[in-house]
Image (tube, helix red, strand yellow):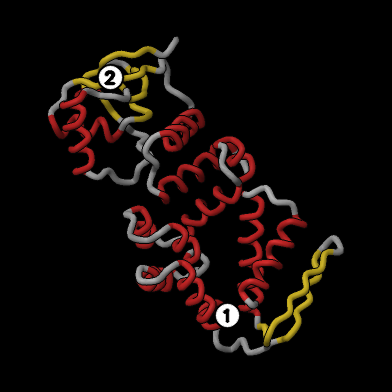
Amino acid sequence: MVPQLKRVPVARCDYPSQPRSALDPEHCRQLGFNMRAHGQQVPVIGYSAGDRFVLCDGGRRLQGARLVGLTELLALDLGKEPTHAELLMTQQSIDAHHQALPPVDRAQLFRNMLDTNQWNARQLAESVQVSEAQVSRSLALLKLCPEVQKLVNAGELDPSKAHLIGQEPDPAKQLELARVARGLSRAALTAHLRKHAPATVLGPESTVRLARVKIVLPGNTVVNLTGTELAMADVLRILSDARKEALKAVDAQYDVRTWQRMMADRSRATGD
């Protein structure tokens, strides 16, 4: 069946697969008033199931219509129930082209797509046309405790800061770091985490420090680190920072020689 545009009664609409963890009632109400005053500009999307119409997209418009007493919605009827994978892809496409999902909801949508399609991060990135680094950063939000995730979704904690906080496995410490992060820039939060890394990551008993650390990896790969009294926490931080910078270079499509030169130039410029 070819998808067709039609009007459906609000009272017969359901949205069981709503990807948003919460709908802002006031925002939905204002959207409803706008639709009543200016007409519905974007149809909801779904399919008929008996005498019901099941939405795949348009939860805020449906709720807004209910709140202001609209009786009908303009809808695009897909003609059939989409598969779970098709539904997830539809919701992701809507997220990319309309108002974005809250960050943690998007991360959960990505996780569902990975599990449903048995994809890895690279395959998901190719499918939704974002970088693999973006997928990884998004999925990292799922490591946060529920309280911190709520702060991220509410816009009270920047996702880039939350990504840093997610490196701490203890939920109680995550929540404390989230409180601290509100008054800090991302750079200041990074410095705070570095300062407290020995105690929070490894514990005070980790006192062995080296001026040079040689890491031999499989495949005849060697990583050499030099610094002033490097402890394991410092090694973790340095490797983590290097990985982040490498991911940025991949996003920008730099080759390894260009990236190496840029990092050296940056180091000289900052006096490191």
Residue at (45, 63) in percent of width and height: 161
Q: Position of residue 255 (x, y in %)?
A: 74, 51
Q: Position of residue 43 (x, y in %)?
A: 32, 23
Q: Is residue 86 above or below residue 129?
A: above
Horizontal side, residue 197 vs residue 80: left or right: right
| Quadrant for the C terminus in the image | bottom right
Q: Position of residue 174 (x, y in %)?
A: 42, 69
**The residue under label 2 is which amino acid type?**
Leu
Name of the residue lying farthest toward the right: 220
The residue beneath circle 2 is: 74
Q: Is residue 268 above or below residue 87?
A: below
Q: Earlier in the sequence, mark 2 or mark 1?
A: 2
Q: CA distance from mark 2 to mark 1?
A: 57 Å
Circle 2 residues within 10 Å: few <14, some 14–19, many ≥20: some
Location of residue 118 by image quarter:
top right
The residue beneath circle 1 is: 202
Q: Is residue 93 above or below residue 189?
A: above
Residue at (50, 81) in percent of width and height: 196
